[in-house]
Amino acid sequence: MMSPRSVAVVLLLLLAAAVPSTASNAKDDEEEDLQYLMDNADDIPASDPDEWLQEGSSSSSDDDLLQDDESEPDDLPQDQIDETHVVVLTASNFSTFLAARRHVMVEFYAPWCGHCQALAPDYAAAAAHLAAHDDLALAKVDATEDTDLAQKYDVQGFPTILFFIDGVPKDYTGARTKDAIVAWIDKKLGPGVHNLSDLQHAERILAGDDKAVLAFLDTLSGSYSDELAAASRLEDSVNFYQTSSPDVAKLFHIDPAAKRPSVVLLKKEEEKLTFYDGEFKASAIADFVSANKLPLVITLTQETAPSIFDNPIKKQASTLCYFATQILLFAVANESSKFLHIFKEAAKSFKGKLLFVFVERDNEEVGEPVANYFGIAGQETTVLAYTGNEDAKKFFLDGEVSLDAITKFAEGFLEDKLTPFYKSEPVPESNDGDVKIVVGKNLDQIVLDESKDVLLEIYAPWCGHCQALEPTYNKLAKHLRGIDSLIIAKMDGTTNEHPRAKPDGFPTILFYPAGKKSFEPITFEGDRTVVEMYKFIKKHAGIPFKLKRPDSSATQAGSTESPTSSEREKNSGTTSLKDEL
């Protein structure tokens, strides 16, 4: 019988022997995982949306919608849809085609997009239904091929549908069905201008319309009337009228002796009259109406919210990209009188360039939710600039709220001289791990680098699903760390924010393909395993890649080659349990 001391010695020897064995097994398992990915890599071609989803996969995403046996008859396979009347446009023929037709609807699509695939039969049917119109066409652009064209028209998601009238784009706001598309276009092609010939009718318009546009013309037909009608179709919320009667013109405050054509916008607001003095072209008139139809300062309510956040007043961010913009004043009700007159005075210099909005901070119906959305705490009067829902950048005015300060702040905003505010942790001093740490302040540099494919996990520290994903995500990053064109990253979504990385719950996993950072990221919605995430990356990568086994010279000097998994199973006498990828 062994003495207690002998037993202790034996246990120590066993433990000493077990340590390298455990490390070796872990390394072997890791190599098996990597080998599995390498063995299957050739079956998952880069940028191939048609064949990557392997049999047995339990999930699909919006980008990969699989037909089932119970599809309705209208859900035709893509190659059976009759798109005879849908014109295919590219960068080479886009401008000339739009110049040759007054009305063109254009769908910007991506071949892999499930929503685009669902729209295709209805869009084709609408095109066939409207084919008899000589001056109308329905067309489509593959935005993944003609990326410059998509960027020019600020395509942020798929499908994006624009309706061009004389080359001027307008968002399609109807449903994605054949009947809805046809009805929407028919309304745009119908008469948009009403004739006013007698005073009684004119007086009813003045009494009933909150806003109205009147053109004083020599005749109610011809080129000027056509331009006015085209302008009316670009502006949905204001009624357009025309008259050749001096008496009607006088009633609308136009001098009967004025040079024709003359245009006036009337509103039931503090600023009642606004006269147009620009070129008599549809797009210019529509821009004038859009810029002047609202008061100098709009008070945010449930009723005014759509006209504020959907208003087409634009700030030019570059020669190709535009977005809606507002300057917002947050103040509690009993403090508002101190600042509103200053705010209105500042707004006069930016009419048609920026929307000035007053938000009653302590209004529970709208003030509180909007303040919370912008991250405004407390009751202090606050002025911020906001670039709109698509871009979603915000800028805060520092210092006192004065006329001079607001004016300089708005000027800096228009000239892109302000620094946007993002909730952000400090940029990490070291970021050399397999999983790169992203915060609000460095997301542009890491995630939006056009030369890199980037997978970003947005997580919350308290989230159980995020905690469960972490070892798998780390393993994925470790296997792919040798791919120079690929970055695996993560961001704490509770302490960081960025308009191009919006979480839809935790965790949210987003992929940003190289060369396509102007588009919305692609959401990963598959099983959260190394293999499924790898397949997803391989499918959408902008830069194709292949895995390589790590150089054996990196192993410790003097080590022998590891046995294969089958040899280990034979030698162990038992069946080893693999990590199921």
Image (cartoon, rainbow, N blue to C red):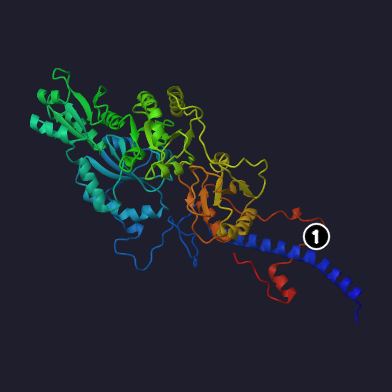
Residue on which disc 1 sits: 559
179 on left or right of 500 = left
562 on left or right of 328 = right
The residue at the far front in this view is: 334
At horizontal 90% and vertical 79% (from top left) the residue drawn is 2
At horizontal 37% and vertical 28% (from top left) the residue drawn is 353
The answer to which image quadrant residue 188 occupies is top left
The answer to which image quadrant residue 191 occupies is top left
Task: Give percent across and percent down for residue 152.
Answer: 40, 36
Q: In this view of the protein, which residue sits in the foreground, 484 or 79?
A: 484
Q: In this view of the protein, which residue sits in the foreground, 229 or 51?
A: 229
Report the amino acid beneath label 1. Answer: Ser
Task: Give percent across and percent down for residue 511.
Answer: 52, 50
Q: In this view of the protein, which residue sits in the foreground, 346 or 63?
A: 346
Q: Indicate whether 229 appears above or below 483.
A: above
Mark 1 secondary-structure assignment: loop
Q: Quadrant of the C terminus?
A: bottom right
142 on left or right of 535 = left
At horizontal 34% and vertical 68% (from top left) the residue drawn is 70
Q: Quadrant of the N terminus?
A: bottom right
Task: Give percent across and percent down for residue 341.
Answer: 37, 26
Task: Give percent across and percent down for residue 481.
Answer: 64, 51
Q: Would you say residue 227 is visible in this rendering? A: yes
The answer to which image quadrant residue 251 occupies is top left
The residue at the far bottom in this view is: 1
Q: Residues within 10 Å of mark 1 (few under 14, many from 20)?
A: few
Q: Indicate whether 361 appears above or below 199.
A: below
